[in-house]
């Protein structure tokens, strides 16, 4: 798995990585939505099993929907983060359960959902996603709560110490980036060796993709690096990769 993390240095403060499967659509990834709005008259009294949010180096304080909630007593839901698509928002992770989060935006989004993707972040800033995105519509200043899952096969043991936040339409290209290594050379050579001279050389030599040998590994990593860099350059202001612990 280390080879994935090496590639992700291209996306420091940006993205993650995926399991050995072909790229899937957001509908496949979002099999459920555990993010729910918090009624204003209950915003300080919810229990952890139904809570959502996260902080990246959060400072002590009691933001909206936080005071009195176990695991969120030092949560700061002030507008500490921003993207051009989402606007300013606050994010908090429970101190008692790494999968529980609170989330609050300054903008209402009723046509496109905002998604939280659970990640593991290394000390060098590289990140890899460890579970399916959870997405929700938002209302300005309304606290959203929910649970993020560590359900990516082979990554269940990783700590959930980061979250990537983006709007739902970006998910297909994000997942394509993260699947870049395992989808090589199928994506480059959809018709096998007959596609191009490049495919004629590499497809027969890499029957198991990048895992076949050192040369195949290098080509797969180069391919992933290219599509992830394209994603980062195109959407760098539209999503954010936050360390939460």
Image: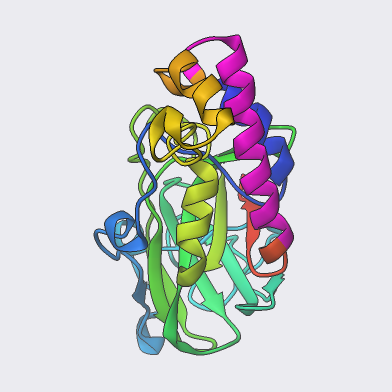
**93 part of magenta stretch:** no
Does the magenta stretch mainly form a helix, a strand or a loop? helix
**Residue 45 picture location, percent across and down:** 37, 73
**Residue 91 picture location, percent across and down:** 57, 65
Mark yes or no: residue 6 visible: yes
Q: Residue at x 49, y 49 (%)?
A: 176
Q: How many marks?
A: 0
Q: Residue at x 63, y 64 (%)?
A: 239
**Residue 158 picture location, percent across and down:** 47, 30
**Residue 196 picture location, percent across and down:** 53, 35
Mark yes or no: residue 155 visible: no
Q: Residue at x 29, y 65 (%)?
A: 33
Magenta stretch? Answer: 211-233
Q: How is the image coloured?
A: rainbow
Residue at the outermost top position: 213
Q: Residue at x 52, y 32 (%)?
A: 181
Q: Quadrant of residue 52?
A: bottom left
Is 42 on the left or on the right of 173, as rendered? left
**227 part of magenta stretch:** yes
Q: Nearer the viewer, residue 192 or 235?
A: 192
Quarter that holds the C terminus = top right
Q: Quadrant of residue 7?
A: top right
Is 170 on the left or on the right of 85, as rendered? left
Q: Nearer the viewer, residue 183 or 101?
A: 183
Q: Quadrant of residue 198?
A: top right
């Amino acid at each position: 798995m280390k080879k994935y993390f090496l590639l992700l240095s291209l996306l420091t403060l940006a993205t993650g990585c995926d399991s050995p499967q072909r790229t899937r659509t957001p509908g496949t990834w979002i099999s459920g939505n555990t993010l729910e709005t918090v009624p204003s008259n209950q915003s300080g009294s919810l229990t952890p099993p139904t809570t959502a949010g996260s902080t990246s180096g959060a400072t002590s304080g009691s933001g909206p929907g936080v005071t009195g909630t176990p695991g969120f007593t030092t949560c700061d839901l002030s507008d500490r983060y921003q993207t051009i698509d989402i606007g300013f928002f606050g994010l908090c992770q429970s101190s008692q359960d790494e999968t529980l989060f609170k989330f609050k935006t300054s903008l209402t989004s009723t046509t496109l959902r905002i998604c939280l993707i659970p990640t593991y972040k290394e000390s060098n800033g590289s990140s890899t996603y460890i579970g399916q995105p959870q997405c929700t519509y938002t209302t300005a200043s309304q606290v959203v709560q929910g649970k993020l899952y560590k359900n990516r096969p082979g990554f269940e043991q990783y700590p959930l110490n980061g979250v990537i936040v983006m709007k739902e339409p970006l998910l297909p290209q994000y997942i394509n980036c993260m699947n870049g290594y395992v989808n090589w050379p199928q994506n480059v050579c959809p018709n096998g060796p007959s596609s191009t001279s490049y495919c004629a050389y590499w497809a027969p030599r890499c029957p198991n993709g990048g895992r076949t040998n050192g040369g195949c590994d290098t080509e797969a990593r180069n391919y992933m690096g290219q599509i992830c860099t394209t994603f980062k350059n195109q959407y760098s202001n539209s999503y954010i990769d936050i360390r939460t612990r």
